[in-house]
């Protein structure tokens, strides 16, 4: 039997199933709080075997640190009341996804229109350009190609994209 810290004699397989239910409950609690903040949205929830909950929020216009702190303060007592972890043995970190994190949600693509992105395709090819538009099916980027630095419009379907990252331009 494989044991994981924080699971109290539960096999890893049981921990994973329980973990999915815990994440679902945390998501419901977080989304309930986000109703009051329609410009912010939940990107991802991760739980380490040490019961360290990492919750990532983003916003259509970014997320101020004060909003993240306030959200943490509102969510923590709800998690305690939900009694998701034995003896309420957990920690909570609320942050925004870093610039080095790939875009995960359609809403993140929309908020980054006009920014330079690097798109890695499933076949390993990399495209770089300005994100021009986003549809339900994919994105359009404007690439600069060749020695003459000509502009080229490229449509990419989401089903061919491995990941997309926003480029930091100085």
Image (cartoon, rainbow, N blue to C red):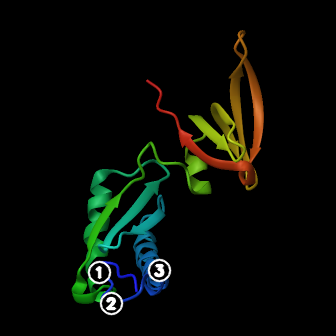
In the image, 102 versus 36, the foreground residue is 102
Which residue is at a point 26% across and 83% down the rendered structure image? 80
> Percent x, y for residue 14?
46, 87
Q: Is residue 18 above or below residue 51?
A: below
Mark 1 sits on what residue? 6
Q: Quadrant of the C terminus?
A: top left
Q: Which residue is mark 3?
A: 16
Q: Foreground residue, 35 or 87?
A: 87
Residue beneath the point at 70% across and 30% down: 142
Q: Is residue 145 left or right of residue 22?
A: right
Quadrant for the N terminus in the image: bottom left
Q: How far apart are labels 2 and 3 at the CA level?
A: 13 Å
- Which mark lies nearer to you, 2 or 1? 2
The residue drawn where x is 36% and y is 69% is 48
Q: Which mark is residue 9?
A: 2
Check disc 1 and report its element: helix, strand or loop. loop
């Amino acid at each position: 039997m494989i044991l994981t810290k924080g699971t109290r004699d539960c096999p890893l397989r049981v921990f994973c199933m329980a973990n999915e239910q815990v994440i679902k409950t945390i998501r419901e609690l977080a989304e309930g709080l986000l109703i009051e903040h329609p410009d912010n949205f939940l990107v991802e929830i991760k739980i380490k075997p040490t019961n360290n909950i990492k919750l990532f929020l983003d916003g259509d216009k970014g997320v101020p640190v004060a909003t993240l702190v306030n959200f943490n303060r509102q969510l923590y007592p709800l998690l305690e009341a939900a009694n998701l972890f034995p003896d309420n043995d957990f920690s909570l970190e609320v942050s925004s996804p870093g610039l080095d994190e790939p875009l995960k949600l359609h809403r993140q693509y929309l908020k980054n229109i006009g920014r330079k992105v690097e798109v890695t395709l499933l076949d390993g090819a990399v495209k770089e350009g300005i994100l021009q538009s986003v549809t339900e099916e994919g994105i359009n980027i404007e690439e600069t190609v060749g020695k003459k630095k000509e502009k080229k419009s490229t449509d990419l379907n989401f089903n061919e994209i491995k990941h997309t990252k926003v480029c930091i331009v100085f």
